[in-house]
Amino acid sequence: MAHILAIGIATLDIINQVSHYPAEDSEVRAEHQQFRRGGNATNTLVVLSQLGHQCQWAGVLVDEPDLPLILADLQQHQIDYSACRRLAKGKMPTSYVTQSISTGSRSIVHYRDCPEFSFDDFGRIDLQAIDWLHFEGRNVDDTLRMMQLARTKRPELMLSVEIEKPREQIEQLIPMADVVMLSKVYAQSRGFDSATALLNSLSGPQLFSCTWGEQGAWLKQGTQLWHSPATPPAQLVDTLGAGDTFNAGLIDALSRQLPAAQALQIACELAGRKCGQQGFTGLVI
């Protein structure tokens, strides 16, 4: 299986489950509360590790009281974090999640008090043993330089980038990647009302994906377009990290050189399975 390195963040997720989403200026009681590790890059790696891949994460770790919970989860899933930058002061990124039991939807308030993983940090990583390099689309200037450096050092290395949120100049990352993973949120922020509208606006040799919730997901390469319907679980439990799971399924299938249409179907099925359970542990049977 592949040796996969992901650049991005790990978070502490504080999840309050409520019977229904509260109205503004109201008070509700949480039915359940969970503290767990989150973050797009590390979520994707945790799924990939369960699929049998050797996984490594590079990001920023802050030595504060919430760190042991995050490290314990990474260790449980055999994620190598030795390339991370360690800081003595600050706060790990923290997501305060309100999750509706009635709909499975979630709303997030995010807080952070730590710097991004930098180009200089990335420059210290040995890329020779890496088969696939995945980036969260954030910290655009430094991420672009990281991708350029990877292209210089390892021209044959597979690069993927997740573009989930609209950020200034984030489109600069697209030409550097072999696989570009786009979200509904990003598409709508750019004025597109469907995945196909966004994908048809893009050209290049890359493989582009776009997820669209209950409508499923699409892939495009050249002029070829594929669609896979969503595969919802019998009961919608937890949508948090479904997109990260989709990305993991896509990376797994493509790293095994499966056809694009099959990779898309595998990724949708895996994301649907994730929506039927809390968290990521035990996702792959």
Image: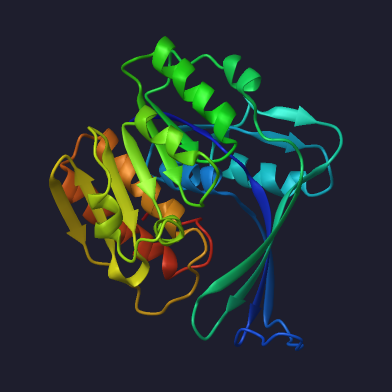
Residue at position x 75%, y 89% in the image: 26
Residue at position x 64%, y 26% in the image: 118
**Residue 5 in the figure: left or right of residue 232:** right
> Residue 236: where, in percent of width, then height?
43, 77
Tell which residue pokes out farthest to the left in this image: 224
Tell which residue pokes out farthest to the right in this image: 89
Between 157 and 190, the residue placed more toward the observer is: 190
Between 276 and 11, the residue placed more toward the observer is: 11
Between 120 and 72, the residue placed more toward the observer is: 120
Name above or below for residue 259 compared with residue 146. below
> Residue 275: where, in percent of width, then height?
43, 68
Name above or below for residue 16 compared with residue 102. above
Colour pattern of the rendering: rainbow
Instruction: Determine which quarter of the picture holds residue 97.
Output: bottom right
**Residue 102 in the figure: left or right of residue 174:** right
Name above or below for residue 49 compared with residue 277. above
Residue at position x 35%, y 79% in the image: 234
> Residue 248: where, in percent of width, then height?
39, 46
Q: Is residue 54 visible?
A: no
Residue at position x 27%, y 49% in the image: 201
Instruction: Determine which quarter of the picture holds residue 218.
Output: bottom left
Q: Is residue 235 visible?
A: yes
> Residue 238: where, in percent of width, then height?
50, 70
Quadrant of the snapshot with the N terminus: top left
Quadrant of the snapshot with the C terminus: bottom left
State the count of labels: 0
Instruction: Determine which quarter of the picture holds residue 59.
Output: top right
